[in-house]
Amino acid sequence: MIMKKSEKWKTIFKSKSLIYIVIAFAVAPVAINLGLVFTDIIYEKTGNTLTAKGLNNAEWLGFWKQYLAIAISFVGLCVAYVSSNTDRKHKLQEEQAQQYLEGVRQEENVLVDVTQGFNTSIVYKALLQQSKSANIYDGRMVLTNARANMDQMHIKFEILTELCDDFKKCENCRYLPCIDRKVMIELRDLFYDIEKHYFNMLDIGESFLECLDKEQERIKLLETETKIQNNTEELIELYKNQGLTDNVYLSQQDLQSIKKQIKNLEKSKLRLEEMNKAISEIQKEIDYINKDARPKFIRYCKIYIDMKKEHARELRKTGNIQYNKMNEKL
């Protein structure tokens, strides 16, 4: 707080410097002449002299005539210098603010892309559609594209934003801990948390498609074995009608083997439970992302961008970013 007050007084002094110069020029002659008068009084009482006598009225008016001309010229030069210096300062602050704001806009675009990248509906719909399809290729392509897109979002987030800073520069900062650092860390941790759950959803989706692929293969094989069973039973009837007992015996042996295979295939329906469990876990991850993490991430994105835009306004106005300590704001 003391540091803030000190900086405030420095800013006030700089902004009022021209007024102080004018006052100094106005007061200085009076102070000098009073000093000379005081030395004359000492001389008259003690006989000791320190300087020449003070100016009389005529000399005083003449002095003021010359002094004011010089003072006005000097003040004019000061005004021109201060005005020029102020213009340069404002121009520099404007350039700094624009450059800073350009970085903020880039971060804002990245955060918008990242937020849109957490697209869970396209993945869920693709998995549900695949459960009705005989080919899981499309579903795998959706998962692959979603994973690649999230990898791209990860790179953008770490390279094109300031949110993955190691905060080494904060260690000796007099504002530590500050609002900016808290918001940045919270936003960074939210991104990594959502990313973890999103990839977990994709991993479960991969497992679901593997189970689905095996289930579809089981159904195809079951249909084939059922047809073979029907054909074998018809063949046995044909052999019986023809009196080919040896062929009947051999075909009955084949039929028993086929029925056993069909029975084993029917037991494999347990994979349906695995698939339903996978869908349930995927839905759980989607609910967490969409209902809990993503809204909080969006809220902190807005706080972060608004905070940075406020810093751009501070740069434009004062040339400095105003950080706030936690105990001063919260």
Image (cartoon, rainbow, N blue to C red):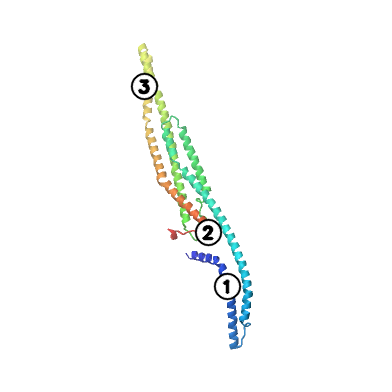
Front tag of 3 and 1: 1
Name the residue at the top extreme: 242
Q: Which mark is residue 256?
A: 3
Q: Which amino acid, mark 3? A: Gln
Q: Helix or strand or loop: what does disc 2 sit on?
A: helix
Identified by mark 1, the residue type is Ala
Q: Is mark 1 on a helix, strand or loop?
A: helix
Residue 25 is at least partly visible in this image: yes
- Percent coordinates x, y for residue 305 in the rendering: 48, 51
- Whole-number angstrom distance, CA of label 3 to CA of label 1: 118 Å
Which residue is rendered at x = 61% and y = 69% of the image? 75
Which quadrant is home to the C terminus?
A: bottom left
Residue 24: give its label: 1
The answer to whether any part of residue 203 appears in the image is no
User: Which residue is found at the position 60% from the left and 87% from the top?
Assistant: 44
| Residue annotated with mark 2 | 317
- Are the residues at dot 2 and dot 3 in contact (C-beta closer than 8 Å)? no
Residue at mark 1 to residue at mark 2: CA–CA distance: 29 Å
* Percent x, y of residue 270: 37, 32
Q: Which of 228 and 195 is in front in this view?
A: 195
Mark 3 vs mark 1: which is more N-terminal?
A: 1
Against 36, is 116 above or below?
above
Q: How crowded is mark 1: few (under 14 residues within 10 Å), some or many (20 or more)?
A: few
